């Protein structure tokens, strides 16, 4: 058994009509565009295999995994959405490929309802066959009423299997206001507007989809880390404070206090590691200075810039041979790093 029929709230009674129950589902889903009367549609991300479509490596078959979806009724205002459940993998065979032309099919889920003129009352998964085209990508076929796409299938010339030919097309729907738990590399590509994503299996940061892109909305707060150092010569440090947090999209605030326990002078650029990789296409400057600097070491030694590569910052300084800073920074090498001082690094960094 695959598509479990009938979908919820299809039998039309006169006292408790199917549409009344579908409207209650519509109200519970929420999050529709202001003024919408058709209800939200999409795959519910927390159940089963989430109706994911995969292609056969040996035939022109596609397979729809288990899952739950909501399909809106676009035939009439406030007709309400249908809830549909698939309990086993479902296989479908696509028509053979042309020898010279390209084609794209759509694997979709659809509701049929006799109350709106259909011959049956059920939901089904099917294939909409596209038209052949001389170039790729071929145009997509038109979806029927009361349907959502699950995948776009590229039927290129002469292919005999669907390896690498399946493009995910599932729209997603939030679960009663609960955020979708995922990770930063697998955000759903077609969510409903207002969908909230929480990275790292339910931890923050979180993002909200605005119809075009995911926008950062909140973070984990201050997080501690232990920085490593290179280029400081014989100088040694205790880490008094090393914290960071995201303060916007791809932006972090860093606050590091390093207490020197042994003086020294470096021979190469002094670097301090970060728990993320800064954006390297632009020079970014943080504040860097010594507190209680000691003899021969001026406070406000210079600035920090994120040149180079890797998850680190390079410690630089203003040139000592000019009365006023000219915008250029010198490597912080050969300079005395005093004992008993606290070196403070703080500021905002754009992340890669």
Image: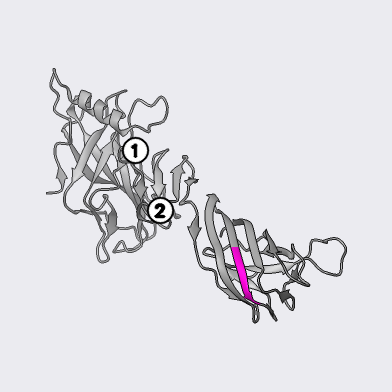
The quarter of the image holding the C terminus is bottom right
Q: Residue 326: percent from the left, percent from the top?
A: 83, 61
Residue 31: percent from left, percent from top: 37, 33
Tell me if I can see residue 324 in this picture.
Answer: yes
Q: Residue at x 17, y 30 (%)?
A: 9
Name the dominant secondary structure of the magenta segment.
strand
Front residue (pair 311, 299): 299
153, above or below 121, in the image: below
Say if 64 sits above or below 83 in the image.
Answer: below
Q: Which residue position holds label 2?
A: 199
- Asked whether the residues under the numbered discs 2 and 1 touch, taking CB atoms below 8 Å apart as contact, a structural biologist would say no
Position of 336 with respect to 69 (left or right) is: right
The residue range painted magenta reads 257-262
Where does label 1 land, which residue?
A: 177
What residue is shown at x 68% (from left), y 64% (from top)? 305
Q: Is residue 109 magenta?
A: no
Please indicate, yes or no, whether residue 190 appears anywhere in the rendered image. no
Local crowd at mark 2 within 10 Å, few (<14), some, or many (≥20)?
many
In the rendered image, residue 259 lying in the magenta stretch gets the answer yes
Distance (Cα) linking label 2 and label 1: 16 Å
Where residue 135 sits, quadrant-wise, is bottom left
Q: Give how far across and how far down residue 280 sits, in percent.
A: 62, 63
Q: Nearer the viewer, residue 94 or 276?
A: 276
Q: Is residue 169 left or right of residue 295?
A: left
Locate residue 303, reporting x and y percent: 71, 63
Earlier-in-chain disc, 2 versus 1: 1
């Amino acid at each position: 058994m695959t598509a479990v029929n009938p979908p919820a709230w299809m039998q039309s009674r006169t006292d408790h009509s199917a549409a009344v129950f579908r409207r209650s589902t519509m109200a519970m889903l929420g999050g529709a565009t202001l003024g919408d009367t058709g209800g939200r549609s999409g795959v519910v991300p927390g159940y089963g295999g989430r109706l994911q479509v995969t292609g056969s490596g040996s035939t022109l078959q596609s397979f729809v995994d288990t899952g739950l979806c909501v399909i809106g009724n676009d035939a009439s205002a406030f007709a309400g959405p249908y809830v549909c459940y698939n309990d086993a993998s479902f296989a479908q065979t696509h028509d053979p490929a042309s020898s010279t032309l390209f084609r794209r099919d759509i694997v979709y889920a659809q509701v049929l309802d006799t109350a709106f003129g259909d011959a049956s009352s059920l939901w089904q998964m099917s294939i909409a066959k596209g038209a052949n085209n001389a170039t790729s990508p071929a145009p997509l076929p038109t979806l029927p009423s009361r349907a959502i796409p699950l995948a776009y299938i590229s039927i290129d010339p002469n292919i005999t299997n669907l390896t690498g030919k399946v493009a995910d097309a599932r729209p997603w729907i939030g679960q009663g206001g609960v955020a979708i738990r995922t990770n930063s590399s697998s955000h759903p590509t077609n969510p409903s507007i207002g969908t909230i994503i929480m990275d790292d299996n339910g931890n923050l940061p979180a993002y909200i989809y605005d119809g075009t892109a995911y926008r950062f909305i909140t973070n984990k707060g201050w997080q501690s880390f232990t920085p490593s150092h290179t280029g400081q010569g014989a100088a040694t440090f205790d880490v008094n404070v090393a914290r960071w947090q995201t303060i916007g999209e791809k932006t972090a605030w860093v606050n590091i206090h390093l207490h020197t326990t042994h003086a020294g002078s470096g021979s190469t650029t002094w670097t301090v590691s970060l728990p993320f990789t800064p954006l390297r296409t632009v020079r970014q400057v943080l504040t860097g200075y010594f507190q209680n600097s000691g003899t021969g070491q001026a406070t406000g030694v210079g600035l920090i810039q994120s040149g180079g590569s890797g998850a680190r910052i390079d410690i630089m300084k203003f040139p000592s041979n000019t009365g006023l800073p000219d915008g250029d920074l010198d490597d912080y090498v050969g300079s005395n790093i005093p004992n008993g001082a606290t070196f403070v690094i703080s500021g905002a960094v754009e992340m890669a």
